[in-house]
Image: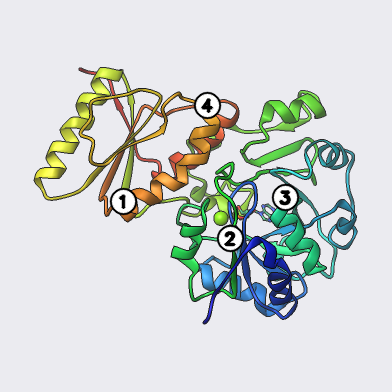
């Protein structure tokens, strides 16, 4: 099918596509989304088809203003109100009891609905012009790293969607924090830029729960509360390994792998944070030279995809374990992208 690149001053055209049952990729402050109008059942099914997304993985409904929530949810709890007032619009998704008539393709048959108000001006205007809430997962093929720049959306979805709105980059880089406020205490289902600490500050300690063990547990084994979290996710085509431990030993081990794989004719990427190293420069990438976590979040998916474009077969990540706040959210994505392959190295 013909895909049109839509410039920021052509949003009316994107809205028309939505109204006529089309699907359109659009930039947000987190990652690009792939949207359909919530009343367009066929378009919603098409999103799953185009992405290769399992049908039991529900979409997030994007709205431009809080008033639109009345059509989506039966009940906005006290916690939900506080979070809406504090963090919305912004990179936060709330899980709430769903209104009966909402398409079960949006919620994948669950009794709840995920709602988000993006703050990105293009996303806001696009939703507003569409005249209805827009259901959207991330604009990437299922399992691949989410798209944070226009080129990556194009790579995955060109010829498969009606339009792609070209945004100004870069974005925050990680998907929204998901908080289930249909339960008490509230529960973080996916960590992100709105951190546990920020949520505790407004809700009070003990009012919000997050299980940090989710970082190292394979949700595929059945503990996933956000259905999407159980699938292979965020993964580059290359086989990604995280190496941890004594700095010198990790470096030595990475060099060992580099030589071994290179001798076998394979391409090896090396990824690190916050230190200049004398690794071979061909496929060596910094997530951030200063160690700034916002920079790491913004660069992560772009760099994973860059390794793919370079035809890298193996990626070794040097000591990137980070546990709290935004860093914890970054590690949550990284460990999934690596399919939980972590090697601890102690001996030099
Ligand atoms: P994506 O926008 O691609 O990050 O996908 C949306 C994420 O929201 C997936 O991880 C879904 O599992 C999650 N999600 C959507 N609706 C719900 C819901 N009602 N309950 C829990 N998680 C949800
Ligand atoms: Mg996604």
Q: Residue furthest left?
A: 263
Q: Secondary structure at mark 2?
A: loop
The mark that comes first in sequence, 3 or 1, is: 3
Query: Is residue 133 left or right of 344 when viewed as pictured?
Result: right
Which of the marked residues, 1 or 4, is nearer the chain's N terminus? Answer: 1
* Mark-to-mark CA distance, 2 and 1: 27 Å
Q: Secondary structure at mark 3?
A: loop
Residue on which the image places disc 2: 166
Coordinates of residue 203 in the picture (x, y in percent): 81, 29
**18 relative to 139, above or below:** below
Q: Earlier in the sequence, mark 4 or mark 3?
A: 3
Q: Residue at 67% x, 80% y: name it.
A: 42
Q: Is residue 124 above or below residue 315?
A: below
> Which residue does the numbered mark 1 point to in the structure image?
238
Which of 122 and 326 lies nearest the eye of the viewer? 122
Q: Which residue is mark 4?
A: 323
First-in-chain label (4 vs 2): 2
Local secondary structure at mark 4:
loop
- The answer to which of marks 2 and 1 sits earlier in the sequence is 2
């Amino acid at each position: 099918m013909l895909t049109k690149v839509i410039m920021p001053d052509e949003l009316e055209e994107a809205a028309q596509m939505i109204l006529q049952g089309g699907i359109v990729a659009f930039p947000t402050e987190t990652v690009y989304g792939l949207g359909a109008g919530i009343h367009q059942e066929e378009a919603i099914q098409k999103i799953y088809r185009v992405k290769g997304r399992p049908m039991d993985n529900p979409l997030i409904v994007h709205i431009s203003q809080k008033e639109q929530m009345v059509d989506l949810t039966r009940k906005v709890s006290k916690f939900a109100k506080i979070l809406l007032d504090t963090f919305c619009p912004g990179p936060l998704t709330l899980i709430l009891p769903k209104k009966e008539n909402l398409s079960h393709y949006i919620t994948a048959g669950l009794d709840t609905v995920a709602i988000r108000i993006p703050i990105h001006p293009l996303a806001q205007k696009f939703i507003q012009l569409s005249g209805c809430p827009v259901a959207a997962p991330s604009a990437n093929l299922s399992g691949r790293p989410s798209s944070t720049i226009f080129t990556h959306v194009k790579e995955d979805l060109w010829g498969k969607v009606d339009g792609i709105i070209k945004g100004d980059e870069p974005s925050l880089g990680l998907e929204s924090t998901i908080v289930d406020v249909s339960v008490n205490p509230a529960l973080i289902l996916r960590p992100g830029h709105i951190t546990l600490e920020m949520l505790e500050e407004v809700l009070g300690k003990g009012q919000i729960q997050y299980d940090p063990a989710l970082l190292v547990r394979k949700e595929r084994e059945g503990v996933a509360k956000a259905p999407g979290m159980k699938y292979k996710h965020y993964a580059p085509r290359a086989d990604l390994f995280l190496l941890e431990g004594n700095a010198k030993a990790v470096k030595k081990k990475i060099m060992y792998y580099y030589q071994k794989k290179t001798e076998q004719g394979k391409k090896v990427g090396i990824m690190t944070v916050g230190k200049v190293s004398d690794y071979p420069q061909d496929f060596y990438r910094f997530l951030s030279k200063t160690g700034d976590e916002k920079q790491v979040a913004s660069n992560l998916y772009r760099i994973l995809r860059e390794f793919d474009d370079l035809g890298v077969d193996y990626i070794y990540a040097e000591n990137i374990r980070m546990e709290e706040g935004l860093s914890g959210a970054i590690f949550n994505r990284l460990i999934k992208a690596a399919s939980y392959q972590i090697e601890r190295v102690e001996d030099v």
